[in-house]
Amino acid sequence: EPEVTQTPSHQVTQMGQEVILRCVPISNHLYFYWYRQILGQKVEFLVSFYNNEISEKSEIFDDQFSVERPDGSNFTLKIRSTKLEDSAMYFCASSGQGSVQPQHFGDGTRLSIL
Amino acid sequence: AQSVAQPEDQVNVAEGNPLTVKCTYSVSGNPYLFWYVQYPNRGLQFLLKYITGDNLVKGSYGFEAEFNKSQTSFHLKKPSALVSDSALYFCAVSLMNTGFQKLVFGTGTRLLVSP
């Protein structure tokens, strides 16, 4: 069964540094998402992406965040200048065409900001 | 704004017994409801969804969920629990009827099935 893959599985970064989290969605999917889960808290929506542009973003997704689909397969989340509170598990998800298709999630990238 | 409540942090059940994981939702329109399961160090795996129609929805691994509009609930059930069902379960709601879904998750319920 096709999967969403995320790299790296764990990223440790100094505060203030830029970080790029990478995702390869399922190949025929058209909708792409990033969510995050701070340790012990619920999964929170960050952003959705369709047709090479952001569909919707949450209030968490401020100017320090950006997303890109640089080629036909990758989907990236960039945090420009990381803060301690950015430490979390970041999940990429994708879904297919058609009404109310379930999202398929990757295993996540654990981001630790020092 | 839509929201989801999972009132139990943890549910304990003996193997072979039926299980129920509770979820209630609050939305201003017709909800689209989902259950996901998360195993340690893994992402969320889709179990089932309710869009419209029959209130009892069947999903993966023998799980089912019952949509109750009057009680605004979408409880997850399984007739006979397995030890391997032990995991973290998340209920989610969306209002979007397009291809794009913004999911709002509950806080999760840890299910522990004892042998």
Image: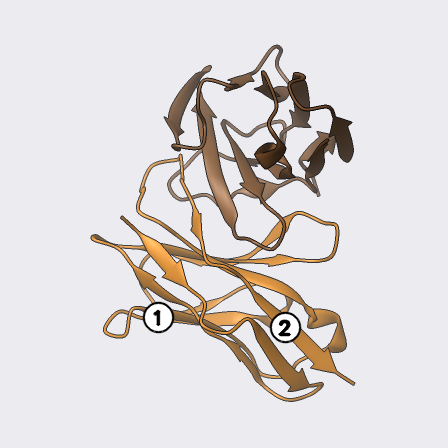
- In the picture as drawn, the residue positioned furthest to the top comes out as A70
Q: Is residue A77 above or below residue A106?
A: above
Task: Tell me the amino acid under the disc marked 1.
Answer: Ser
Q: The numbered mark 1 sits on a residue in which chain?
A: B
Q: Write down the quadrant of residue A106 in the picture.
A: top right
- In the picture as drawn, the residue positioned furthest to the left comes out as B28
| Chain (orange) | B
Residue position marked by numbered label 1 in the rendering: B73
Q: Nearer the viewer, residue B26 or B94?
A: B26
Query: Is label 1 on the same chain as label 2?
Result: yes
Q: Residue at x 66, y 27 (%)?
A: A23
| Chain (brown) | A
Left or right relative to A21: residue A41: left
Q: Nearer the viewer, residue B68 or B53?
A: B68
Q: Residue at x 46, y 43 (%)?
A: A101
Task: Tell me the amino acid under the disc marked 2.
Answer: Leu
Residue position marked by numbered label 2 in the rendering: B111
Q: Residue at x 70, y 79 (%)?
A: B113
Percent x, y of residue A90: 62, 37
Question: Mark 2 falls on what kind of element?
Answer: strand
Left or right relative to A51: residue B51: left
Percent x, y of residue B47: 56, 59
Of the numbered discs 1 and 2, the one sitting upstream in the chain is: 1
Q: Nearer the viewer, mark 1 or mark 2?
A: 2
Question: Mark 1 falls on what kind of element?
Answer: strand
Left or right relative to A38: residue B113: right
Count neighbours of disc 1 (C-alpha within 10 A) and say few if under 14, some if 14 to 19, many if 20 or more.
many
Percent x, y of residue A7: 75, 29
